[in-house]
Structures are given as structure tokens and as C-alpha cells.
Amino acid sequence: MPRTSPKPAQEVSHTDLGRRIAARRMELGLTREQVGDRCGTDASYIAYLEERAANPSAGSLVRLADSLGTTVAELTGATTDQPPGRGTAWLDSELVPLSEAECGRLLSTHGIGRVAIFTAEGPGIFPVNYVVAGNDIAFRTSGDALLARAAGTEVAFEVDHIDDAMKQGWSVMAVGEVVGVTDGEALQRLDAIARSLPWAGGQRTHWMSVTPVRITGRRVGRK
């Protein structure tokens, strides 16, 4: 990859490739300078790839993917319609239980998780954008949705992360009663800490909250 930086485009055009590069870099906690050092280029070129409508060569993509610990397919979105975890496991893989403190750290403050409930048609699992507020896990849905009707019942909330390139990942499950949030101050606090609107769109303004009574987790990786 050349050390010279390409001429900047006239207007910023954030592409899917650029967003994926930036997201993976931030997930690893790397600066543009660090990524550039890993793949032998300038930080300005990494910025160009993230912020402009770039068309890097196949060799550049390979080196960039390697520096980010992922694959070209992941960076270019070729795996978007495929389930995670298609790679072959390491021969020395192992499953390790996580402490409650580690589970809490992995839940972090926000993300996407899954809520498992019982419905009239049987068990159902629904992906939701969530936030962590104190000890509670909160998410938004519509007032007439199945999740809203589950208020007062015990549910399971699950969040996970899969790294296909490294054949490793983790999952955390919290179990507790789900309730509708009606207190005005609590609603204002949740609206304030929510990082974005629900990805599913629509009128999903009804906050639900789960106070876990049990949290467990597991991590899979190499010994």
C-alpha cells in the first residue's frame, strides 16, 4: 500500500466500506495511525477510506482486513445475508463461563440484544436496541406489540458478539421480570441515555425494563 495519500474528493461520501472500516477500528480501540502502521500506510489514507467514496485495490483490502483482524468479505459486506459463525472452529477451542462482573461489563451501556418471551402462539424471540440504566436493561417497542403485552412476565434477555475471523465470541443472558416504564423521571432518563432511535423504525416509543435476577455468560475461544 503506498505511503502517498490520494487527492481528497470534493465532498465527503461515507460508503458502506468506510463505515465498516471505522466500526471495526473503533471496536478494536485503534487509532487511524495505528491501523496505518499495521498495514504500511498513512493515517490520512485510512481517513480517506473511511470518509470518501474510495475503491482500494484487492491487495490493499487484504492488508487492511488483516490489520483489523477480519476478512475482506466482512469489510465489503459480502457476508451481510449470512449467519455469523460459519468459520471452522480451532482445534483447541474451549467454552469458559463468565463471572457476573464480566457479564455486566460485556452488556455495557447499549447495543442490540434479544428478548425471549412466551406468546399465545408459543415462544418468541425479538431483537431490540437496548440501554443499561443502573441495574436495569431497557428497550423500546410499540404499545400494542407482543413485547408490550408480555409486561409482568419473566423473560430472558440475551446479547452476544461473534468474531468470525478469530472464531471466537461470547454471550450473556439475563433473566428477570419485564415491566412497562411509566414513571416520568425514569422515562426522561431513558430518553436521555438512548444513543439512537430503534433500528426497526416506526412508532417504538414504549419503554420496557428488565431487572435481572440472574445473569450468566460464556466465552468461546482458543485455550
Image (spheres, grey):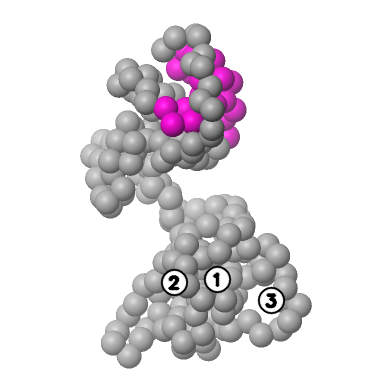
Mark positioned earlier in the residue sequence (3 or 2): 2
Question: Could you say whether the residue bearing mark 2 is in a helix, strand or loop?
Answer: strand
Which residues make up the magenta segment?
28-54
Q: Position of residue 132 (x, y in %)?
A: 62, 63
Side (left or right) of 22 relative to 192: left
The answer to if 51 sits in the magenta stretch is yes
Q: For the residues carrying marks 2 and 1, which lies nearer the camera in this image?
A: 1
* Tag 1: amino acid: Phe
Q: Which residue is mark 2?
A: 115
Which badge, 2 or 1, is on the more N-terminal residue? 2
Do the residues under discs 3 and 2 have CB atoms within 8 angstroms? no
Q: Which mark is residue 187?
A: 3
- Image height of 159 relative to 152, above or below: above
What is the spatial separation of the Cα atoms under label 1 and label 3, in whole angstroms?
11 Å
Type of amino acid at the residue the image marks with label 2: Val
Q: Pointer 2 and pointer 1: residues touching (CB < 8 Å)?
A: yes
Q: Mark 1: which secondary structure?
A: strand
Residue in front for this viewpoint, 178 or 142: 142
Please identify the dominant SS of the magenta region.
helix
Crowd class of label 1 (few under 14; some 14 to 19; many from 20; radius 10 Å): many
Q: Quadrant of the N terminus?
A: top left
Who's the residue at 71% across and 83% down the image? 183
Which mark identifies residue 99? none
